[in-house]
Image (cartoon, rainbow, N blue to C red):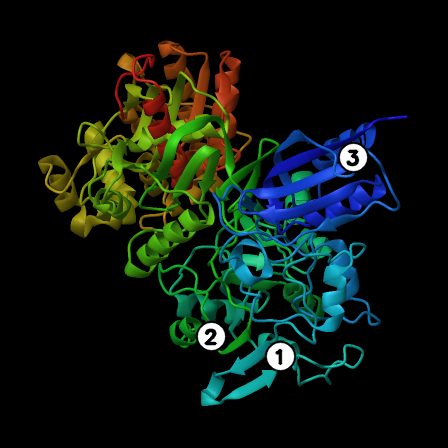
Amino acid sequence: MDRRVRVAVRVGGVVQGVGFRPFAHGLARRLRLSGFVGNDAAGVFAEVEGTSADVDAFVVALREEAPPLAVVDYVRVTPMALVDGGQADGEPVFTIVASSAGGEVATLVSADSATCADCLAELRDPGDRRYRYPFINCTNCGPRFTIVRGVPYDRPFTTMAGFPMCDDCRREYEDPGDRRFHAQPVCCPACGPKLWFHETRHETRHETRHESRQEPQQPKPAGTTPLKSTIDALQEGAVVAIKGLGGYHLAVDAENESAVAALRGRKHREDKPFAIMVPDLAAARKVAELGEIGEQLLTSRRSPIVLLPRVANGPLATSVAPGNRRIGLLLPYTPLHHLLLGDLGRPIVLTSANVSDEPIVYRDEDARSRLKNIADAFLTHDRAIHTRTDDSVVRPVRGRVQLQRRSRGYAPEPVTLHRKVPRHVLGCGAELKNTFCLAKDDHAFVSHHIGDLENYETLKSYTEGIRHWRELFDVTPTVVAHDLHPEYLSTKYALDLEGVEPVGVQHHHAHIASCLADNGEDGPVLGVAFDGTGYGTDGTIWGGEFLLADLAGFQRVGHLQAVPMPGGAAAVREPWRMAAAHLDAAGITAEELKTRHEEHWDDVVRLARSGLNSPLTSSAGRLFDAVAALLGVRDSVNYEGQAAVELEQLADPRERGTYPVSTARNQVSTVDIIRAVVEDRKNHTPKPIIAARFHNTVADVVARVCEQLRKAETVALSGGVFQNALLLDRTTESLQHKGFRVLTHSRVPANDGGISLGQIAVAAAREATSTTSPARHPG
């Protein structure tokens, strides 16, 4: 007979709020084990007793059969003395014990998850007591991070604390055989959150309330529910502010051109594409080319916005994504969205509700105040959002997923580091597309998308976010890593902190370190960091860099030829200025472009030559801007990267030609590139061909410079310019053809959203090693 044993088990990872305790309970009951399971600040703990074979099976199953939302980092087992002296008397008893507070926080919080199939089935079942209830959830789906106020993840530490469970929900919560066993946000129409509709159009006031205790089998008559009022408003062309998981969105009928145009005007958003929510995959196929990976992303539990090729002559209004060959799609990810889209039966614009460049609005009173001149109506509810969180944005590239904005559905799940950090570290991130990162042990907690730190509201969101995450994950940084740019608000925040060790990290080194950390590597690598701007160690603006780098340091071993940025920031907003500077450096003119800006052309050229307010830059992003202006794609931009995005879309992917470009002394001659583009224009070469040749040329010179250097066999590609799918594909192909192994991003964005991870990786590596790095500049 197999001997009896008792063990203590500790499980770490994303194991709270994902049904792990009920899973362990059911597993123990199945294996006829006695003992208990519970939550504490460190994760899940358990004691189990039974035959050694059954206990071993229990431990193995904890990892291999974990719930869908769980991420098990480790299962640690410690032998214990038997409680019953080795005798099994009667039916084994296994219980879930109360959670304990206090102690060092080591548990991880799950990201919000899209509504699961089981809950959707109940939502659509007229016989179910949660029929058409917009807040249905279970242990496998629903709100998590956005409602968490503290740990352990139990109802009192969430924004559901103010909704006492009714008797029916309590029975489900306490029944080990129920899908909602210990599901913290569990609720129903009798005890959970409610919807309200409030209309402000035409100086009228109309409010519809969803009664919390209505009989589910007798839904309110048509025309009286908040949901029906919302649908009526959308069909009439109204702009509706809708409260979601991580904040408010602005919605309009995506097939109504006047409604979409009105939203653009009120948001002062001239060209940037809107995201579109469609009812289902069938509707998605009518507006975009999905592909296998696209479908997987759209239907995943993370439910991000997926950037996909747009179907020509589809039903969407022109103003949804003017001049854009791609569209950002997402499927309903909350019960409310499923009900709304299912009843409406057509796509809607669903864009973050904010004013200008401020962060997404998430508090009800702020929404009423800040959105009153944008929204005609509000669909809201009384479940508070604790942490504002934007939708994530992803794009399929080369058979992989490229994150462009890592937020809802991904945060706050950590990036696991391949080496532990010696001390707690805070990475403060960059100025644009900011994220921060907190690291302890082997976990790097990269924050949700914060945005551009250019105004008080975003800075407030940034500082409040750091405070909340420090408490949530029990991180007290003693090392604070920051960008070298002295005027970044994130840098100033770092340098104002007391009692910490500040570590300055050069922007492009952080990009490459981020790519290394993303791939679990130390280097050395040849790092190619192409982006818009970054403060260089020589006082110029870098952005087209070849670095021999490891995590601890780097050497700048090559770069794009530097040219002036006439007017500084003005050159970012007006790409024609960069074209003028590049043309002047090449000693040529482009008459068509000069004619368009005849009034200011000579003044801008003189400014560039003088060096006044015209810092030198090696930026690849600004080179893309210049070529876009030369081809008449974009002389000025309304959002960051617009010219480069439109240049990529213009390029004919069938064209494989390149331009002859000098790479002497590992410096790429942008003069050669500009002259070749102008020559093609004079020869009336079609613009899509020129745009493609330009992309091919940049890819080719990257591979040639790396081959000339050949100081490492691995190349890491990072920086926002490599979010260009055509460029990334051609560059990877060229490098691999020359025998290089290529690292790209998959867990964090290649843009500045990944900088904070790179900063903590650099800071930790410098502390761990001081003399072994082949790359000598400390960054």
Q: Residue furthest bottom?
A: 204
Mark number displayed over residue 375: 2
Asked if residue 475 can be seen in this view, the reply is yes
Disc nearer the start of the sequence (1/2): 1
| Amino acid tagged 2 | Ala
- The residue at 83%/27% (across/down) is 3
Point out residue 390 in the picture as x, y percentages from the top left corner. Answer: 48, 55
Residue at the image position 31 percent from the left and 37 percent from the top: 478
Closer to viewer: mark 1 or mark 3: 3
Q: Is residue 363 above or below residue 559?
A: below
Tag shown at residue 85? 3
Res 712 quadrant in image: top left
Against 240, residue 58 (above or below) is above
Q: In the image, residue 295 lies at what x, y percent?
A: 68, 45
Badge 2 marks a residue whose secondary structure is loop
Tell me which amino acid carries mark 1.
Answer: Pro
Q: What element does badge 3 sit on?
A: loop
